[in-house]
Image (cartoon, grey):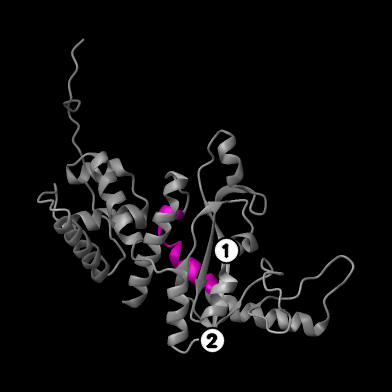
Amino acid sequence: MTKTKEHAGGTVSLVYQCRLPLSTRTVTYLADLLRGHLKAIRSRWRALPAGRIATIVLAVLRHDRRLADMAGGSDVSAATVRRWRDELIALLATKAPRLDRALKKIARRGGEVVLIDGTLIPTQRRTGTANRPNYSGKHHRHGLHVLALTDERGRVIWISAARPGRTHDITAARRDRILAHLRDAGLGALADLGFPGLDGDPDDPVVVTGFKATRARKLTTSEKEANRALAAGRAPVEHGFAHLKNWRILTKLRTDPARATGLLRALFVLTNLEAAC
């Protein structure tokens, strides 16, 4: 039996073009970031120019293109595209601000409150006991829990590390010491009913949540009105998550969950770049 790498008779590799709905500023920023990195590590060669590499990586992130598909259209290997993707994700993730600095920046601008919420990023269901914590009973699916803060307009200013899907919003907030950081910055926060009890100071509350009904106690008319007003004030945080999830690679993560934090922070930086354009 003879092995050959040639295509079967009458077949050719077809390449198609696809529109990338991103600004040239984002592509330029990513290309300049790569050029600076290559200069710092004294790497003199890549298979493609920095601008082309940036475009390929953005297509992978925005459209969730398969690495082998992008590699075939650029005449490189899938392993090469994977290295480019991981390299640029790591560079972008370092640009994500820390929580304390993000809050102090809002305070310097004259802001008074931020919006806080959590979401689930769906992942593939993997076998084994190690993946059981990633199952969210609330959403009835496997995923990773992420906490985010936005300003009053819905622009994401900070994003937490990715945690197992069963993590509760208030648990994640306590681990990140969000209440202490808010007090240090002199800011308040609007939150949903996933955060009751986070702020234990009734005289000087920092985190404002709505009223929750129980089987034994129904909400009064004034409490319902307060909940509606709070929901209207919190609406921009949902818009912030929607902009982040425009990156279709988050539709269902196929990457290693251990790499999810870097990916989310990289997409957070890219989302803010697009919002500034």
Which residue was labeled with disc 2? 112
Task: Name the residue tied to disc 1.
Answer: 118
**Would you call the spot at circle 1 few (<14 residues within 10 Å), some (14-19), or many (20 or more)?**
many
**Can residue 136 be seen from the camera position used here?**
yes
Q: Is residue 49 above or below residue 176?
A: above
Give percent across and percent down for residue 173.
59, 65
Which residues lie in the magenta part? 237-250
Q: Nearer the viewer, residue 172 or 124?
A: 172
- Farthest-out residue, right: 216
Image quarter for residue 106?
Answer: bottom left
Q: Nearer the viewer, residue 113 or 55?
A: 113
Nearer-N-terminus badge (1/2): 2
Q: Is residue 35 left or right of residue 158?
A: left
243 in the magenta segment: yes
**Who is closer to the viewer here, 264 or 36?**
36
Q: Amino acid at mark 2?
A: Glu
Q: Residue furthest bottom?
A: 110
Report the quarter where the N terminus lies: top left
In this rendering, is residue 47 above or below 195? above
**162 shown above or below 179:** above
Would residue 267 appear left or right of 166 to someone viewing this image?
left
At label 1, which amino acid type do we have? Gly
Q: Tag 1's secondary structure?
A: strand
